């Protein structure tokens, strides 16, 4: 298993700042979660709920012409969850399926967020990654 | 100590001084001796925009001991409040998301440390924002204080498992959802299943989901409605000694607040071990289904 370059860069970005600053970085990602493509906006049932997250978050990973795209939606009242989804959406965008599947399952635990966010909440991100990888295997 | 909110809306409650309205807070923001604290389920929600001047207390990263399953001790609490610039005699107005669910939890923990003047913002974060009141992403800067080291007092408003075992025969309120109460689930619907090995409830507990105390807009229901819910509905009598619990003690803090400050019960304890402890403990009695069940016979 190996972490692709874009995700590695995101991790380095987090680890380069103090734990409290990491929360603000996560907020930037939350603000930057790409909107759902219209075809999903009209049909949220095409997305999968991530029950490991406290907030209602839905993800859809797809492979189009050999390239991975991750779409996600979560309410504005759940910025932590939005931030997690955004990190994965940005970090996995444009990879091949094999590259995305090679992302280590414990990637969320390596962002240095354990103290600032708490392990309980990070479990939501692990759940999201696991569901994305399963969808990619089935895609 | 800040003056109290004399809105007639609160006059019927046993302790109206424990609530302030959004109007009151908007007028008193920046008052000497008043500190506004936001406490949410989501650790980043405060950062997306908070009441100007408010500081943040996170239930998980600030109030829980990082190692032992317990709250922080007096020294850590003094360090927290000192860092936030809070004096021992400050008036604290606490607010948060989800009808003040987490705000009530924080307020209950502050009570363990005997911080006297603690109040909730009726309607919480959602009402403030719905009324289009000011929010900001600007970091709040307060001058640190020397908050005294006060030993946490767990004897008055906190119950442990042993206290619950000794309490049978007196009222217990289970504030979780009906599916958790019956044992069909171990966590609230929509929440991840985690942490308890058995489903069900503590024998004799009445099921009164916490949110019954909240109106549509997240404010507390009026006293008559609350009495109908807890006295007519769940059978509490004036003067009762009550223990409330949920899954980890947060939703039941909301009910603790209602019973103590709005209805005036002076012997209410929150069992924060709650279902994650009881549902995994060896040889404690459990009842499944929608009926409270009988007082268990002694082993």
Image (cartoon, rainbow, N blue to C red):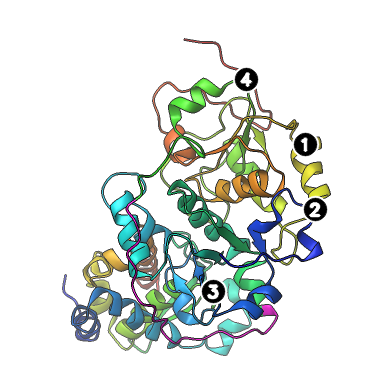
Task: Name the mark nearer the viewer: 1 or 3.
Answer: 1
- The local crowd at label 1, few if under 14, some if 14 to 19, many if 20 or more residues have their Cα within 10 Å, is some
Nearer the camera: disc 2 or disc 3? 2
| Residue A53 seen | yes
Horizontal side of B180 relative to A20 (left or right) equals right
From the image, tell me which residue sits under label 3.
Answer: A77
Ranked by sequence position, the earlier of labels 2 and 4 is 2
Q: Nearer the viewer, residue A43 or B33?
A: B33
Residue, disc 2: B12
Lower position in the chain sequence, tag 2 or tag 1: 2
Mark 2 on the same chain as mark 3: no
The local crowd at label 2, few if under 14, some if 14 to 19, many if 20 or more residues have their Cα within 10 Å, is few
Which of the two discs, 2 and 1, sits closer to the camera?
Answer: 2
Label 2 chain ID: B
Residue B147 within the segment the image draws in magenta = yes
Q: Residues within 10 Å of mark 3 (few under 14, many from 20)?
A: some
Q: CA distance from mark 2 to mark 1?
A: 16 Å
Residue named by callout 4: B169
Note whether A139 is above or below B14 in the view shown: below
Q: Position of residue B121 (x, y in %)?
A: 63, 66
Which is more toward the observer, B279 or B229? Answer: B229
Judged from the image, the secondary structure of the residue bearing numbered disc 3 is loop
Q: CA distance from mark 2 to mark 3?
A: 32 Å
Callouts 2 and 4 in the same chain: yes
Give the extent of the magenta segment: B130-149
Residue at left 52%, top 79%? B50
Q: Which mark is residue A116?
A: none
Q: Residues within 10 Å of mark 4 (few under 14, many from 20)?
A: few
């Amino acid at each position: 298993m190996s972490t692709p370059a874009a995700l590695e860069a995101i991790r380095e970005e987090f680890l380069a700042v103090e734990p409290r600053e990491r929360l603000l970085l996560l907020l930037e990602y939350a603000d930057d979660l790409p909107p759902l493509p219209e075809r999903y906006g009209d049909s949220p049932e095409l997305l999968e709920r991530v029950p490991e997250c406290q907030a209602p978050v839905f993800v859809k990973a797809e492979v189009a012409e050999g390239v991975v795209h991750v779409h996600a939606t979560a309410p504005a009242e759940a910025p932590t969850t939005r931030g997690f989804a955004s990190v994965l959406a940005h970090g996995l965008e444009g990879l091949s399926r094999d590259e995305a599947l090679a992302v280590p399952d414990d990637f969320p635990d390596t962002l240095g967020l354990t103290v600032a966010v708490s392990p309980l909440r990070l479990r939501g991100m692990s759940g999201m990654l696991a569901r994305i990888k399963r969808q990619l295997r089935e895609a | 100590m800040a003056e109290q909110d004399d809105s007639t809306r609160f006059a019927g409650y046993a302790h109206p001084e424990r609530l302030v309205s959004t109007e009151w807070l908007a007028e008193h923001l920046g008052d000497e001796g008043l500190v506004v604290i936001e406490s949410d389920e989501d650790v980043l929600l405060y950062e997306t925009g908070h009441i100007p001047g408010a500081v943040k207390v996170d239930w998980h990263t600030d109030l829980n001991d990082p190692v032992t399953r317990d709250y922080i001790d007096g020294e850590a609490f003094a360090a927290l409040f000192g860092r936030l610039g809070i004096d021992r005699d400050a008036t604290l107005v606490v607010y948060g998301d989800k009808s003040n669910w987490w705000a009530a939890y924080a307020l209950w923990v502050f009570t363990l440390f005997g911080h006297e003047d603690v109040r909730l913002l009726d309607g919480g974060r959602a009402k403030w924002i719905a009324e289009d009141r000011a929010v900001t992403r600007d970091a709040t800067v307060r001058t640190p204080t020397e908050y005294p080291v006060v030993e946490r007092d767990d004897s008055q408003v906190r119950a442990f498992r042993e206290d619950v075992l000794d309490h049978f025969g007196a009222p217990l309120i289970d504030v979780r959802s009906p599916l958790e109460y019956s044992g069909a689930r171990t966590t609230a619907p929509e929440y991840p299943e985690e942490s308890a090995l058995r489903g069900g409830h503590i024998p004799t507990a009445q099921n009164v989901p916490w949110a019954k105390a909240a109106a549509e807009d997240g404010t507390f229901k009026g006293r008559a409605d609350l009495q109908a819910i807890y006295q007519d509905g769940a059978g509490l009598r004036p003067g009762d000694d009550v223990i409330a619990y949920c899954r980890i003690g947060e939703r039941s803090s909301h009910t603790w607040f209602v019973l103590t400050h709005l209805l005036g019960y002076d012997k209410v304890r929150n069992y924060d071990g709650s279902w994650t402890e009881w549902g995994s403990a060896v040889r404690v009695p459990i009842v499944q289904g929608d009926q409270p069940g009988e007082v268990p016979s002694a082993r």
